[in-house]
Amino acid sequence: MEIKLIKSKNSKISNVDYDNLGFCKYYTDHMFICDYIDGSWQNFIIQPFQDLSLSPACTTLHYGQTIFEGLKAYRNQEGEILIFRPDKNAERFNKSAERMCMPKIPEDIFIKSIEELLSVEKAWVPEGEKNSLYIRPISFALDPYIGIKPADNYKFMIICGMAGGYYSEPVNVKIETHYTRAVSGGVGFSKTAANYAAALYPAVEAQKEGYHQLIWTDGKSHEFVEESGTMNLFFVINNQLVTPPLGDTVLDGVTRDSIIHLSKLLNIDVDVRKVSVKEVISSLESGSMSEAFGAGTAATIAPIKSIGYNNKKYNLPEISEKSISNTLLNKLSNIKFGRELTELNWLKKISK
């Protein structure tokens, strides 16, 4: 795999306000790009970040044959660049590709393209415990064809943007029992644009009511909670950490997987099982739910302040430093910066 490098003549990094990074407010100078033509991936290039030229008949614009991923790189105190669990993202990317009738990306190409791009963009990985470089791989169909069938030609790209803290305070969420994000047999487990497009309208309506995100329920009966807008869900009920199971309507989150693994290492009682709306509300009313939080790449762990249901808001207790969510957050942070549990081999170090 030979990657051609076309260097940007003018870096944008001097325009970065490091005190106000936001989330992907600043994109890096370069992007990785390659093409799927005649049954193989080829034309590997790192080039200046720039707009694309597409046919108005491009398959993706009409039929949404596109998938993406999200992962992060961190700068530790030694100045090393560390990528968190890229192999898990490669695995999920290919599950999405299979479901969307798209060509898979070999794991070595997926990871090497990220490594090579970050070798060029090292200066863009910010310092600081709450800061990171967000990495967005994406693949989409290219055929200029109006007709419903899998395309023959595809593009794979990676762009990167600086990321500060995602949520500055605990979030308010609302249990959604009318609109549906995903149904059994659909593409809910895939990281494809369709899932997020379907969620926009109900999410905007909830934001008008003062909620940050929705808690999605199953599409058939709306009796069981599944996940939140950009996060998997965790509850602490009677001192036990509980999270809904995976399935074809729930995204297999990398952070979720990491939390379950760490909980077992830390002897935190964790149970993966169905969680009903009825149980959530009754445990809030009785006080047996001491914590609730979302888990995802963007936010890592986002404590939930309140849960809305049937026009009533249920407040959760204030999170303590010794809470399960803070314990897991601190442990994850130490792992991501290479300070603990390096034997897990969850980090990929940029050596160049």
Image (cartoon, rainbow, N blue to C red):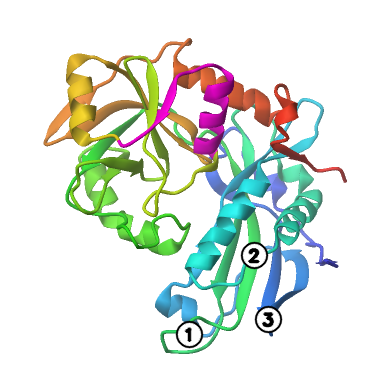
Query: What residue type is disc 3 on?
Result: Gly
Closest to the observer, 160 or 149 = 149
**Is residue 134 visible in this depiction of the protein?**
no
Mark 1 lies on residue = 56
Q: Nearer the viewer, mark 3 or mark 1?
A: 3
Q: Is residue 315 left or right of residue 343?
A: left
* Residue located 60% across and 73% down the image: 52
Vertical order, 335 against 266 (above or below): below
- Give the distance between the C-alpha atoms of the residues marked 3 and 1, in whole angstroms: 24 Å
- The first of marks 2 and 3 along the sequence is 3
| Location of residue 105 by image quarter | bottom right
* Residue located 43% across and 89% down the image: 146
Over which residues does the magenta segment extend?
A: 255-274
Label 3 CA crowd tier, 10 Å (few <14, some 14–19, many 20+): few
Residue 125: x percent and y percent? 71, 41
Residue 268 lies in the magenta-colored region: yes
Q: Mark number for residue 7?
A: none
Mark 2 lies on residue = 157
Residue 168: x percent and y percent? 44, 29
**Is residue 143 visible in this depiction of the protein?**
yes
Closest to the observer, 149 or 143 = 149
Q: Mark number for residue 39?
A: 3
Q: Is residue 322 left or right of residue 186?
A: right
Residue 316: x percent and y percent? 28, 19
Vertical order, 39 against 120 (above or below): below
| Location of residue 344 by image quarter | top right
Query: What residue type is disc 1 on?
Result: Pro
Q: Is residue 74 left or right of residue 332?
A: right
| Location of residue 275 by image quarter | top left
Q: In the structure shown, which secondary structural element does the residue marked by tag 3 occupy? A: loop
Q: Nearer the viewer, mark 2 or mark 3?
A: 3
